[in-house]
Amino acid sequence: MTRWLRTFEHTIIRCLIYMMALIILISTIELGYLLIKDIVSPPVFFLEIDELLELFGFFLLILIGIELLETIKAYLQDQVVHSEVVLEVALIAIARKVIILDLKEYDTTVLIGIAALILAIAGAYYIVRRKLRIDLSPNCGVPQEEKEGSQ
């Protein structure tokens, strides 16, 4: 029974990978189409601010898709969801929201909340990256005095 569930899970994850790849491909083609359409429409080679914001938002949305694909791939390989990749996706998503945000529509408390969210995610990302760097260092766990004495 366990083997069947593992096979089923791997099949579903592979399907998700293929579907995510297809979505990313279609989105990239659509981004290219929008970019060309905006560039060739009068005035030629000049983009309005709203067009730029739309393109940047779309670009970041594709990056989020790529990071989600990386998360699914990592889960398939290691059977573990890597918190570093999840935090990267969260940072890209909140950056996308900030880029396309219309400041006139939100009051100060919402903006402070978004700022706090960015700081919390960035802090968590820093801690996870630092922990990974320490765990991967060759003399992990050896006090500095012992490292210097052995040289």
Image (cartoon, helix red, strand yellow):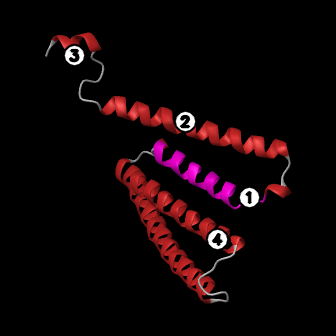
Which stretch appears magenta? 84-102
Q: Residues within 10 Å of mark 3 (few under 14, many from 20)?
A: few
Q: Is-magenta flag for residue 81?
A: no
Q: Disc 2 or disc 4, which is closer to the eye? A: 4
Q: Earlier in the sequence, mark 1 or mark 2?
A: 1
Which quadrant of the figure has residue 104? bottom right
Q: Earlier in the sequence, mark 2 or mark 3?
A: 2
Q: Earlier in the sequence, mark 2 or mark 4?
A: 4
Q: Residues within 10 Å of mark 2 (few under 14, many from 20)?
A: some
How far apart marks 2 and 4 lie (CA) works out to: 30 Å
Q: What residue does disc 3 label? A: 147
Q: Disc 2 or disc 3, which is closer to the eye? A: 3
In the rendered view of the protein, which quadrant contains the C terminus? Answer: top left
Question: Which secondary structure dominates the residues rendered in magenta?
Answer: helix
How far apart marks 1 and 4 lie (CA) works out to: 13 Å
Q: Is residue 1 visible?
A: no
Q: Earlier in the sequence, mark 3 or mark 4?
A: 4
Disc sitting over residue 124 in the figure: 2
Q: Disc 1 or disc 2, which is closer to the eye? A: 1
Q: Nearer the viewer, residue 21 or 141?
A: 141
Q: What residue does disc 4 label? A: 52
Q: Amino acid at mark 4?
A: Leu
Residue 79: percent from left, percent from top: 40, 47
Q: Residue at x 54, y 66 (%)?
A: 62
Disc sitting over residue 101 in the figure: 1
Q: Amino acid at mark 1?
A: Leu
Q: Residues within 10 Å of mark 4 (few under 14, many from 20)?
A: some
